[in-house]
Image (cartoon, rainbow, N blue to C red):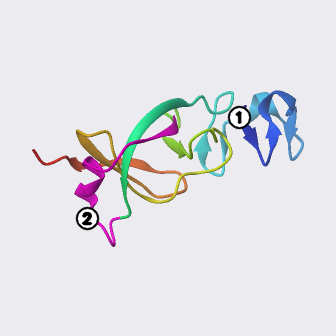
Amino acid sequence: MPSINGVDFDNISSINGAPWSSITNIGGVPVSSGPTCTPTPFGYSDGRRSDPTNACTAPPVTFDFDMTNGILYNPGSCGSILAVAGYYSDGRQIFFWDGASSFTFYDACPR
């Protein structure tokens, strides 16, 4: 279940006195009713020890991806544990995840 600091979204009525219904972002990340994650397989490369294009052929791991907010979480951790920074690929495209709030297109996978 999605959560903030371990508290289930369904149990949050306010944050710092602001009613949940009036909160539009948390830490600069837009929110609607909390993250909605889709299990998404990605190959990974850290981009330092391994070239970013290696993410294209790396064994895929199914991460939790919040497409609405562009947030990548560890497998089974939607709303709580962010994935580590690096390069992620769906086998066709490479994306860079900064480990905090930005999941952006990097390049196409080589053919």
The residue lying toward the viewer, choosing from 24 and 53, is 53
Mark nearer the viewer, 2 or 1: 2
* Residue at the image position 13 percent from the left and 48 percent from the top: 110
- How many numbered badges does the structure rendering display? 2
Which numbered disc, 2 or 1, marks the residue that appears first in the sequence?
1
* Residue at the image position 64 percent from the left and 42 percent from the top: 77
- x and y, in percent, of residue 82 in the image: 59, 51
Above or below residue 79? Residue 96 is: below
Circle 2 is placed at which residue position?
Answer: 51
Above or below residue 31? Residue 53 is: below
Asked which secondary structure carries label 2, the reply is loop
- x and y, in percent, of residue 60 in the image: 38, 43
- Amino acid tagged 2: Asp
Compared across the picture, whether 104 is left or right of 51 comes to: right
Circle 1 is placed at which residue position?
Answer: 2
Compared across the picture, whether 2 is left or right of 86 comes to: right
Magenta highlight range: 47-65
- In this view, which residue lies farthest toward the left? 111
Asked which secondary structure carries label 1, the reply is loop
Compared across the picture, whether 65 is left or right of 107 comes to: right
* Residue at the image position 69 percent from the left and 27 percent from the top: 33
Q: Is residue 69 magenta?
A: no
